[in-house]
Amino acid sequence: MTAKKFLPLSAVAVAAALSLNACAGGAPGSSGSPMPGMDHGGMNTAPASSLPSTTGDHNNADVMFAQMMIPHHAQAVEMSDMVLRKPDVPTSVSSLAARIKAAQGPEIAKMTDWLKDWNQPTMMPGGHGMDGMMGDEDMAKLEAAQGTEAAKLFLLQMVAHHQGAVAMAKTEAAAGKNADAIQLAKDIASAQEAEIKEMQQLLGTL
């Protein structure tokens, strides 16, 4: 397993994600081992009582959830864009990539607005590792892959990516305070667990 690292996301990827206006998403759950090279640094899972409130309507768990999920989602959008640019990827996989992109772009915008309302930076100071984030080598492999190979790699990587998001979302649901953030976390967990199952089924067909 590689050391934790925070993958810098291109301004283009984040801007593209923020410009989206569709919604929905999630992935089928998996109990398999993470792929080599993937960063699996964990989100703070301290109980709500140990996360002091920053204002009356949210606490530090809410802030951390948004600050970590924004770049996590942005990378999923970037990965989806890579697959959607490839001409010979099976339709079932490119369709899934389009749905993931459509779901996560609006969620990025929503969480960005929350952080602005809370007078918090949109990026976590210091850059923390996040569950399921791809490293530079992982992203390069996906960019280079073509056809069925690209489809399989995308699904394997996105299963691990979604598993990380589900873990982060469940932490927020347990430790957060803001009702909207908690609801989004529950929605993310539910949708992405369903997508994980879908992706595992697709892998069996390729």
Image (tube, helix red, strand yellow):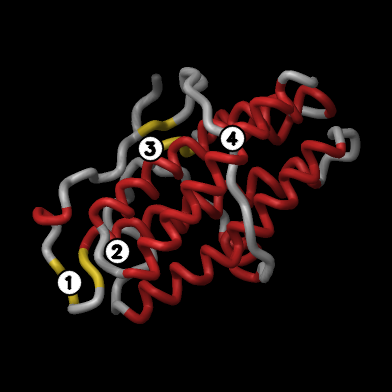
Location of residue 10 (image quadrant): bottom right
Q: Nearer the viewer, mark 2 or mark 4?
A: 4
Q: Amino acid at mark 2?
A: Val
Give whichever of discs 3 and 2 has the lower sequence position: 3
| Sooner in the amino-acid sequence: mark 2 or mark 4 | 4
Q: Secondary structure at mark 4?
A: loop
Question: Mark 3 sits on what residue?
Answer: 5
Quadrant of res 118? bottom left
Q: State the SS at label 2.
A: helix
Q: Which residue is mark 2?
A: 63
Sequence-wise first label, 1 or 3: 3
**Distance (Cα) linking label 1 and label 3:** 27 Å
The residue tagged 1 is 54
Marks 3/4: CA–CA distance: 25 Å
Residue designated by label 4: 28
Q: Amino acid at mark 1?
A: Thr
Label 2 close to label 1 by CB (< 8 Å):
yes
N-terminal-most mark, 4 or 1: 4
| Crowd tier of the residue under label 1, counting other residues whose Cα lies within 10 Å: few below 14, some 14–19, many 20 or above | some
Q: CA distance from mark 2 to mark 4?
A: 27 Å
- Residue at 44%, 42% (x, y): give it: 166
Which secondary structure, mark 3? loop
- For label 2, the crowd category at 10 Å Cα-Cα, with few meaning under 14, some 14 to 19 and many 20 or more, is many
* Residue ID at (9%, 53%): 50
Looking at the image, can residue 8 be seen?
no
Going by the numbered disc 3, the residue's amino acid type is: Lys
Relative horizontal placement of residue 54, taking residue 24 as reference (left or right): left
Q: Quadrant of the C terminus?
A: top right
Query: What's the distance in space between the residues labelled 3 and 2, CA to CA?
Result: 20 Å
Q: Nearer the viewer, mark 3 or mark 2?
A: 2
